[in-house]
Image: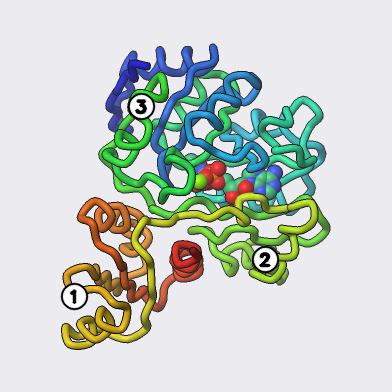
Amino acid sequence: MKTKIIHENDENFSDELIVAGDKLNKGALVVFPTETVYGLGANALDSEACKKIYFAKGRPSDNPLIVHVSSLTMAENLFENAGEYFYKLALEFWPGPISFILKKHSSVSDIISGGLDTVAVRMPNNKTALKLIEYAGVPIAAPSANISGKPSPTRREHVLNDLDGKVDYIILSDDFPIGVESTVLDLSDEKPVILRPGAISKSMIERALGGLSIKIISDDEIKKQEKSPVKSPGMKYKHYSPSASVFSTSEDMTEKKICDFALKHGVSRNMVKYLSYTDDVIMARDLFADFRQADLEGYKIILVKPADGGELITANLNRLERAMEK
Ligand code: TXA
Ligand code: MG
């Protein structure tokens, strides 16, 4: 397939974006920038178009998709009575990096929900994305625009490497996204639970809900769910993993320590990529890009010293831990 590549800069929208929106409406696959990572979009009301997403990514079909909207009204057609937490949080954080899991409206297809009775909804904080959805005139189902199992795409070259030739349109942007995917907050039960930490942190959500205490799903709970109907299907799949083995350290590694580390793991020093982050925002922005770069350069081991503070710390450590799972 020949992919049409266009460039948007968030200030002036080109006529090509109108065409891409129209094609999206009519069943095309369109990669677009968001404030978190690039998304691979299809018309959420068109099951055949949504099926193509799974095929292009090589994604397991029971892993549901987030539906992206450009207005609250568009969101309201996707779920059954969302409740007061949703309205409070959407008012506070939308457009922004948080997806809400809600009881789905019967019109939302099983292709999107992966057979669950819920749907994930998000309004991205990116002008190009919002304009594209508006032009499409329909909600857009979009997972991260990477081949399944690879780190989410945070740079132009990542989407081009993964999806050029497999989709109808790729819309590129020069902006650096946040770099970690949206917070996924389950509001379908009585108590809100964070299924995936992101840039909207637990404490930000708790504050917005007047001090209500909320939980982040634990690894044990995720493991238990692998055996029964899964509430957070995305968590059971191997994720965010570069080909190199990933290790983490809380120590500042001197050259001598890195050599000892390499020896202990049976590789030569030049096979170890050491990534040391001091700032949580920069770690989020760069981690996936650094993973991909290390793979391109053929490293066998990536050793990461994560930034140890900041609002993004939980999201960063979560992505690092998932990358360490083999
Ligand atoms: O920032 C983001 O959320 C990006 C951009 C493109 O918006 N999208 C993204 O989508 O990360 P994806 O498909 O890579 O991750 C969606 C996560 C998966 O872990 C999936 O299992 C979960 O959300 N999810 C989607 N629908 C769900 C549902 N109904 N119940 C539970 N989890 C759901
Ligand atoms: Mg993904």
Q: Name the disc covering residue 4, or none.
A: none
Between the residue at mark 3 and the residue at mark 1, the CA separation in whole angstroms equals 39 Å
Q: Is residue 108 visible?
A: yes
> Which amino acid, by three-letter code, is at mark 2?
Ile
Q: Position of residue 185 (x, y in %)?
A: 65, 55
Q: Residue at x 83, y 58 (%)?
A: 190
Q: Are marks 2 and 3 in contact (CB under 8 Å)?
A: no
Q: Position of residue 113 (x, y in %)?
A: 70, 37
- Depth check, front residue: 277 or 97: 277
Q: Is residue 87 visible?
A: no
- Along the polypeptide, which appears first: circle 2 or circle 3? 3
- Along the polypeptide, which appears first: circle 2 or circle 1? 2
Q: Position of residue 96 (x, y in %)?
A: 51, 47
Mark whose residue sits in front, 3 or 1? 1
> Which amino acid, by three-letter code, is at mark 3?
Ile
Neighbourhood count class around disc 3 (C-alpha, 10 Å): few under 14, some 14–19, many 20 upward: many
Colour theme: rainbow
Q: Residue at x 48, y 13 (%)?
A: 22
Element type where label 1 sits in the image: helix
Q: Position of residue 203 (x, y in %)?
A: 58, 69
- Depth check, front residue: 157 or 301: 301
Q: Residue furthest front?
A: 266
Q: Name the disc covering residue 170, or none.
A: 3
Mark 1, residue position = 269
